[in-house]
Each structure stands twice: as C-alpha cells, then as structure tokens.
Image (tube, grey):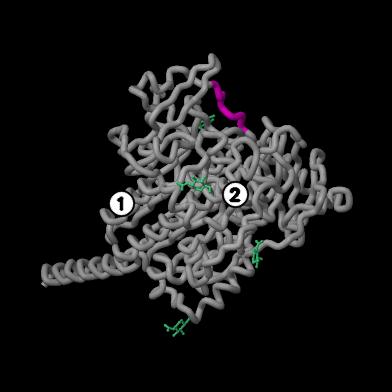
Amino acid sequence: MKTQKFISVVLWLALVSLCLKSTAANVKKPHIIFIVADDLGWNDVSFHGANEIPTPNIDALAYNGVILNRHYVLPISSPSRSALLTGRYPIRDGTQGFDLEPGEARGIPLNRTLMPEYLRQLGYGTHLVGKWHAGYHSVNHTPARRGFDSFYGFYNKLIGYFDHTIKLLSEDGQVHIGNDLHRDTPEALKVVHDKGYITDLITNEAIMIINNNGNEKPLFLEISHLASHGNQNVLDPLEVPDMQETNATFSYISDLKRRKYAGVVKSLDDSVGRVVTALSKAKMLENSIIVFISDNGAPTTGMYGTSGSNYPLRGMKNSLFEGGVRGVACIFSPLIKSAGRVSMKKMHIVDWLPTLYAAAGGNANNLNDIDGLNQWPSIVDEDVKSLRNHILLDINLALDIEGIILENYKLIRVQPHTSNKLLSNEYYGSNGNSSFNPHYNILESALSSPTGLAISHLTEFNSTSVTKADNVRKRSEVRCSQPKTFADCSNYCLFNLENDPCETNDLAKHSIRIRNVLIGFLYNYRKLTVQPASDVIDSRSFPENFHGTWMPWKNV
Ligand SMILES: *[C@@H]1O[C@H](CO)[C@@H](O)[C@H](O)[C@H]1NC(C)=O
Ligand SMILES: *[C@@H]1O[C@H](CO)[C@@H](O)[C@H](O)[C@H]1NC(C)=O
Ligand SMILES: *[C@@H]1O[C@H](CO)[C@@H](O)[C@H](O)[C@H]1NC(C)=O
Ligand SMILES: *[C@@H]1O[C@H](CO)[C@@H](O)[C@H](O)[C@H]1NC(C)=O
C-alpha cells in the first residue's frame, strides 16, 4: 500500500514537472536583433520625414513598431558603445571623452559585466558582427571574451569598406597600417582576409548566425555596422559597393559626396531587409525584437564630414546639442501592443541593458550598479509612463563640455571652439531633403520592401494601413525654423526641448531656478566621474609586430 502511494506520488510529480516544462517552453524567450548604425544622422532615414535617401526597410520596422523619437546617446562612438554594453554612464567607468584610437591601451574595465554576458546567463546564444570599438589591448578585452560566443568584425573605430584596414600615424611620422578583420571565439582569435564590401560581409555573417541558430535557442545578435562612418580618406571618405549603380539610383542628388552617402545608406537599408527576411524564413520573426539605432549624430561637415544630415537639430557628432545626442532609433516586435506609434518618452542608450534583460524574462532589479532603467513596459504599452525623468548627456572635462536633461529642460555648457567645427554650435550640412526624388513613394516602397513583405502577415501592414504609416511619419518629424544666430553657451544655456527642440531660445537668464536645479544635478554627477585611462599610443601594438594585423598586444 505504502509503496503504491509512493509510486503514485512520484508519477504525479513527474507529470507536474513535465507540464511545467512544457509551459516554460511555450513562453519562449524572444530573439533580440540589435542593429547599430554608425554616425547616421537624424534626417538620413526617410521615416523622419526627409525624402532624399529612401530607407524603406528601416521605415517598415519603424511604421509598424515604435519610433523612439527621444532616444539619447553619447556624442561619439566608444562612449556610446560602453554605455550600451554596461548600462552605465561612461563617466563612471572612465570610458567618456575621446574615441579609442588604434594602439591605445584603454577599454571597458574588465570588472564590468556586459549585456551579452547577462543574456547568456538567461540562456541566450550571443553574437556580435561588425564594429567593436570598446578596447582590445589584451585578449580578455576582446568581444569573444566579454560575453559573445562569436565575433566577426573589426576592433577599431573604422576600417576601409573594401580593404578592411585602418592606419595610424605615429608621433615619429611613420604610418602603421594593418588589416582589422577577425573571426573570434572565446577559445581562439583568428585573423581573416575576406574579400568584399563590409556591409555585405557583416550581413552575410548575420544571416548565417540566424540560420544556424534557428528557432530553438534564444538568440542575441548585435549587428554593428560601419555604415555610414567615413574611412580615412579625408577628401573622399565614403565607398559604395558599385559607383555606377549609385550614380544611376541617386542621379537626382547632384552633390557627389551626398550621393555617395546615399549609396552607403542604401546598402545599410538593404542589409536590414535581408536580415528580416532571414528571420522570417527561419520562423523566428514572430518571436523577435528588432532594434535599430545610430550610435551618435552625423559628422555633417568639417574635415571628417560625411554629408550626413542631422537637420533640423542643432550641432553634430561630438557635440551635446541634439544633433549629436538625439539619435535615430526605432524598435519592432510583434510583442509590442498598439504598434505604429511615435514615442516621446525619454530614453537613454544605457536603458537597453535592463530593458532587453527584462524583455528576455530576467529581473532587471538584479542588475547591480547600473544607470539604465527598464523601459520594456513603457515600450510595449503606450499607456505606461517612462521611469526616466532625467538624462546625463555627458561630462567631458577634456573638452570642457557638459549637458543634462531634466523633464523638458536641457542645460548645456560648451566652449565656442570656432576653429573646430566638429564641436560646432550650429546646424551645418545637408538638410537631407534638398534634392527632389522623382521615382519614389516612400510609403509604397516601405510596403513592398523585403522587410515590408516579411512583416505584413504579423502586422496587417497593407495598402489600407499606409495612411496610418503616413501619420506616424508626420508625427516623427521635428519642425523648426533655422535662426540666423545661435546663443553662445559657454556659461550654460537652458532650453525647453518640448517647444524648442532645435535649441534656439536660451532661457538661462530667465529661468534661474530651473537652471540652478540642473546645475545641481550636474554637480552631483561630476563627483562620480572617474578619470579616463591614459590614451598614449603603445608602439607594441603596431601591426608590423603582428603580420600586418591589429591584434591584442598586452598580457593583462
Ligand atoms: C522634406 O520635403 C517634403 C516634400 O517637400 C516635405 O513634406 C517635408 O516636410 C520635408 N521634410 C523635412 C524634414 O524637411
Ligand atoms: C574596476 O576596474 C577599474 C579599472 O581597472 C577600476 O578603476 C575600478 O576601481 C574597478 N571597480 C571595482 C568596483 O572594482
Ligand atoms: C558617377 O558620377 C560622377 C559625377 O557625374 C562621375 O564623375 C563619375 O565618373 C561617375 N562614376 C561612374 C563609375 O559612373
Ligand atoms: C489590411 O489591414 C487592415 C488592418 O490594418 C485589415 O482590416 C484589412 O483586412 C487588410 N486588407 C487586406 C487586403 O489584407
């Protein structure tokens, strides 16, 4: 009798555990595809209202997801990537300030746990394709030792689109040029010499990872593009896959530099279409989250200018004005309710770690010592408020600039480096809308793009809903007129971003109380600032020491 009872209890327990297992399997963790564009300007996507460069695949995601229209980033690459991966303001890890140059022994401190590591703990396969730019002086600083199961791409800030090299001019006037294309795993670093246009190589690798992963294991795939960053050819910094084709497609853009820029962006947009199609074929799209962001604003003019457009926002890459830090961003997922909207909720790039961790079923409260806030509920549901009331934009002691946003107000202090337009206070460059595009109906194109076709059965994105998409597009456009003069902000400017997104009307002298509250916030953050590590170039890193390749050169 007793044994019988025992056996039935055991059977019952087995049955319960089976049921639990199958429910757990039914609530599958979403795949996360995180696409980062490099130096893409506010008005270089057509979903923000400009007609010049069509981005139908990205637009299809935006019109059927959420346009994150107040998504803030750091004003340059390495700090932005540090913030994304750690969920922390770069000032707290010494990763603020200047971009990492080849041969600098700096990077995200090894004692920080990065986003892929956290997602791996939740059972995810984790892969990075494309740009890293977060430090590689020791093997342990490279991406495949920081939480990624695989890495295919480049360590440094840029490579040539075709030759995949980067060069460094050392103080003695020598040029050090090396290949920077790698295929790494946690066990082994491998140098590769693949031929081809980098945007396509990155895309091919991403598709291979999607196909190999399939729908069984949750996938975290970061696709970190070179596009639309310039290369090191200062006078002609962009390379398109096929100039003849670019000439034909964009003949209506008379400025040749801007035309090439359009060709680079087109490849980026095509890449998004190919990735979404692959997700659909692998039956993963139904359960995917796709994020598209730019790491910072476009360097629209000056020596390294690429002809990108941040119009009508003030400033550009490197500056804390909106053109530098209010980045292009949208998210698409069938998990989002009442999709097809423009969110004006404040979000910062540090928020992605807790947001995606929560979306993946983790408890964001378990992430220790981060600045990011879980925005998943406020993204999924329009009615949920954002937890974020303020954003530290940056404190950069080297350039003597700082900025912070609280509610609708933004306080900013910058030096008027008139000789250096990279730190410009004004709006420069293309308005992203000056050439008439004769053949293009943006909305129809989004609908019939590979992305539009792949998502149509999930979203009811069809010719009836085009009007809805058109409204979304209109709402995401920032409208302001460009004034003739801009306020000097060397002793703090205060702007109300709600009615002055282009930062033209300085309120600092009138709203002294608000100005002082914001100065107080900055003061408290300044106390948390960690000095950046030395940015001396180490000659041991030179590629001539590593058969012509950029490689880790230090043991620790
Ligand atoms: C671009 O041009 C179109 C057509 O003239 C106009 O409707 C739209 O508002 C412009 N957008 C921007 C951002 O300038
Ligand atoms: C993490 O490492 C950095 C750089 O090595 C160091 O400055 C910092 O104190 C460390 N933080 C902790 C919490 O150990
Ligand atoms: C593209 O157009 C430019 C300007 O019209 C011209 O100089 C260049 O030769 C063309 N390139 C090709 C490959 O057709
Ligand atoms: C288009 O989508 C709408 C919902 O947005 C739906 O009611 C309608 O039936 C769809 N039309 C076609 C032709 O699929």
Q: Nearer the viewer, residue 233 or 99?
A: 233
State the residue position of label 1: 209
Front position among marks 1 and 2: 2
* Residue 533 part of the magenta-drawn span: yes
Report the disc number at residue 255: 2
Residue 424 image position (x, y, % from top left): 71, 41
Residue 549 image position (x, y, % from top left): 37, 27
Where 85 falls versus 505 (above or below)?
above
**Image-based side of 271 in relation to 252, left or right:** left
Q: Secondary structure at mark 2?
A: loop
Which amino acid, mark 1? Answer: Ile
**Image-based side of 395 in relation to 356, left or right:** right
Residue drawn at 44 percent across, 37 percent down: 160
Q: Does label 1 or label 2 sit earlier along the sequence? A: 1
Q: Is mark 2 within 8 Å of ligand 3?
A: no
**Most distant residue in the top direction:** 172
User: What's the magenta region?
Assistant: 530-536
* Marks 1,2: beta carbons within 8 A: no
Residue drawn at 37 percent across, 58 percent down: 274
User: What distance separates the C-alpha of mark 1 from that of mark 2?
Assistant: 38 Å
Residue 309 image position (x, y, % from top left): 62, 51
